[in-house]
Structures are given as structure tokens and as C-alpha cells.
Image (cartoon, rainbow, N blue to C red):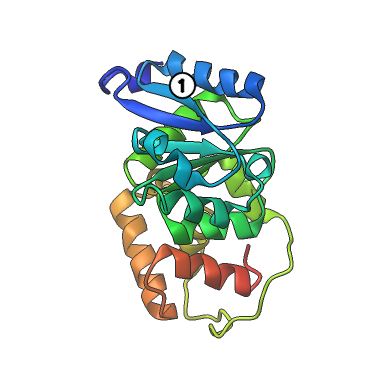
Amino acid sequence: MSFFTNITPHSLVAGIAESNPILARGVSAILADSGVVEGRVLPVGGDSRACAPELATCDVVIFDPSQTGDDLAAYVSLVRSAHEDAAFVVYSDAFSHRDIQSAIELGRICCVCKSDDPEQLVLATLSASRGATYFSLSVADTLDQPEARPQSDYPVMDDRLSPRESAVLLAFARGRGLKQISEELGLSERTINTYKSRAARKLGLSNRSEIVQYALANGLI
């Protein structure tokens, strides 16, 4: 994969928490083919603190909540009780709004669908290892699907935002990255950042988590 050639070969170790041995081998093969990530299968179930020696050797943990017996937030908390700096890739067939919001709030978690191109899994693993939050397009599109939303203390969106400010803020809420938004809207990354900062300031929002919460609570995504 040419866009990984600037990274030291097999410089990252990813633990694969997967109970299906066939799928675990498949994930390991995808990572190995990248030439930059080594995959190691981790035991699933039980107390993750008992797996602390194995977890300590992993830069990233790849898991499917449906295989671990815990929801996304619970499994992340359990693993981080043994390895507090752990980063994660959630590799699943389906994601809920709650999953995506938990990933943003907990940090260092990337999300990829099992139906995505294999390169997405590698990209998510690299992003997680660097402390980033990354959603593949198919995961981000989950936010376009209707779901019951809680009430919020945030004010209802009004005409304080320009159409361009609204578009930029909504794109960030849906998990789009700065470069992707720049390409979609045909604006420079610096201009996108300006619109984002201006819109967030008008609405009293200070970070991406608050932007997502605002958008969910007001039926914008």
C-alpha cells in the first residue's frame, strides 16, 4: 500500500480481540499486508486486567463490541484499567449514535465497518496510535439515520449561523476530517477552521464532543 511507505515497517503492534479465529486471522492478514502493523490475537472475555502483559505490548486494540460481551464504553474502560494509554479501533458490522458519541468522548478511538475497504482498517489503526479520532465514511453515515435523541440544555439552532457555518459545523459533527470537508466544500483548510471556530463560538461550544451533542440533541444529524 503506497500511502504507508513513509512509516517504519511493522513499527506498530495491534492486539485483535476477536473470538472468531477465522476473522482474527483475516484481520491479522490485512494488517500484515500493510507492511507497517503487526497483529496479535488477544483473549476475549474475562478480566482484561489478567491480560495486562499482552495489552502492554499493544499500541492499539482492535475489537468488536458484539464479541466482547460489553458495550463500547464498558470494554474501553475495562482495558484502560489494565493499560491506561490504550488506543482502539472498533471494527464492527453496525454502529449506533451512542457508539459514535462514546468514541468521541473517550478519545483515541477509531471506528470502521467490517464491510469497508481493508485499507480503512489500517488507516484507522494508524490514526488511533497517534491519538486521533477517525470514522470511515460508512460509519459517519450512521449519523444520517434517524434515532431517538435526548433533550438538551443547548439553545435551538437559529439564524445566528450563516449557511456556510452551519454546513461546516454539521460536517464536523458527522465525523468528517478537516481535509475531507475542505475538499467537499471547495474551501481551504484554514477557511474551514475559521468557519468552525466562528460557529462554535456563536453557539457556546468548545470542542468536537459538544458539537456532536448539540447536533444530536437538536435533530441536526
Q: Which is nearer the eye, 84 or 110?
A: 84
Residue 95 location (% of width, % of height): 65, 48
Which residue type does callout 1 highlight? Leu
Residue 15 location (% of width, % of height): 46, 31
Can you tell which quarter of the image residue 130 is in?
top left
Residue 42 location (% of width, % of height): 51, 31
Helix, strand or loop under label 1: helix
Q: Which residue is mark 1?
A: 31
Q: Residues within 10 Å of mark 1 (few under 14, many from 20)?
A: many
At a point 38% along the width and 23% down the height, the residue shown is 37
* Left or right side of 109 for 101: right
Where 22 sits versus 44, above or below?
above
Q: Which is nearer the eye, 127 or 145?
A: 127
Can you tell which quarter of the image residue 194 is in?
bottom left
* Left or right side of 67 for 58: left
Q: How many marks?
A: 1
Please say whether residue 183 is visible from this viewpoint: no
* Left or right side of 39 for 46: right
Residue 105 location (% of width, % of height): 46, 62
Q: Quadrant of the C terminus?
A: bottom right
Q: Which is nearer the eye, 141 or 163?
A: 141
Q: Residue reaching furthest front? A: 50
Please say whether residue 159 is visible from this viewpoint: yes
Where 208 sits versus 95, above or below?
below
Q: Quadrant of the N terminus?
A: top left
Where 114 sits versus 94, above or below?
above
Q: Which is nearer the eye, 216 or 129?
A: 129
